[in-house]
Amino acid sequence: MPKTIVIRVLSARVFLWLSLSLLLPLSLTACSKDAAEKTEDLDSLISSGKKVEAEKLIEKRLAALSEAEKLQQLCRLADLKSTDPEGVSESLLKTIATLSSKLYGLSSKEYAEANKRLGQYYFRKREFQNSVDAWSKAGNFYEQSGDNCGEMEALSGRIAGECASGKCTQQAELYEKLLKLREACLGKNNPQTVIACSLLAEIYSRQKRFSDSLPLFQRVYDSSKSEEERAAASINLGRNYLELREFDKAKSLIDTALKYAEANPVYGRINPLLIAALKAKLYYFDQKKMYKDELSVAEKIMKLNEAQMGPAHPQLAGTLLIYAEALERAGKKKESETVFLRIKALEAKKD
């Protein structure tokens, strides 16, 4: 087992969920301006909930309108359709973007708002690179105009798109910026700000900047609202103390998290919090060179995963590798060789 064991409290799915939770509701300022012409009949239809009739009325009017009026009505149409995930079409949103750039320019708020719409649309359609591109265009305007909250929303969308595509940026500068923007717009104790704090701490940790990640992990720990959140934060904070060789603090935090995870099983599947706590404990024993204790924990992790996945599942290979290396360090070379052969057989199945 490598000396540095990557311990993740956040599974890929949870990380993804955390990353998706960065998207805030879109502000539709540019598309909700009051029309210059009389629209009482349209407003009446909308206020009475007759969405289909309102959409038909807008579409009927479009041909006779100027480009500025047409843009306004298309935005209202997009607003009406936005409540239905399948209602807004790419062509409608692209038309809004094209008209916005033609009438107001590429450096306008109207064009930025149009790209925000496109960014959200492409994300829903799982076209993540298109989503990232659209959010980036929107972000350029907000950064240049000094609109911190608009820039925060656009940067959130960009990061979410990158993470959803499996290409999460590792640039600490972007997460530092996101945290500052969220603090300014939402406040230091807002849950979205705490999420940004956690993400930045993870980036610092991956870059082995443990002195920088420590106060951020501590901040997440202090912001915990429930026992489960506190246990998850304890693992990250404990892991960080391990890297700084502060073993007593690390042990106390990890043991607390492990106790909570063992007392709160997740029925029907492995509790990811339990696995994360056990891996943290495993790393603690490894760092302290307590190899028999390390082997005991490695065996427990292996059995938990084996019971969940089955003994022949290819993804079990990673857990078996941890177990095999723990056997080797504990002086059980024959048993270790047997497990390595099993790993080889599992990896052959992947091919």
Image (cartoon, rainbow, N blue to C red):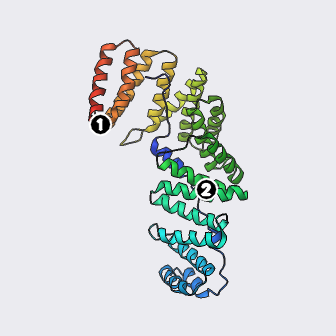
Seen in the picture, residue 169 relative to 151 is either above or below; the reply is above
User: Tag 2, which secondary structure?
Assistant: helix
Residue 350 badge: 1
Residue 169, horizontal then vertical, whole percent = 55, 43
Residue 245, horizontal then vertical, whole percent = 60, 21
> For the image shown, how many numbered marks are present on the structure?
2
Name the image quarter holding the C terminus.
top left
Residue 55, horizontal then vertical, whole percent = 50, 80
- Left or right of 90: which side holds 233? right
Give the labeled residue for mark 2: 154
Q: Amino acid at mark 2?
A: Ala
Q: Residue at x 50, y 69 (%)?
A: 83
Question: Few, some or many C-alpha atoms within 10 Å of disc 2 (few <14, some 14-19, many ≥20)?
Answer: many
Q: Quadrant of residue 334?
A: top left
Residue 262 visible at all: no
- Left or right of 163: which side holds 104? right
Q: Residue at x 62, y 81 (%)?
A: 69
Q: Amino acid at mark 1?
A: Lys
Question: Few, some or many C-alpha atoms within 10 Å of disc 1 (few <14, some 14-19, many ≥20)?
Answer: few
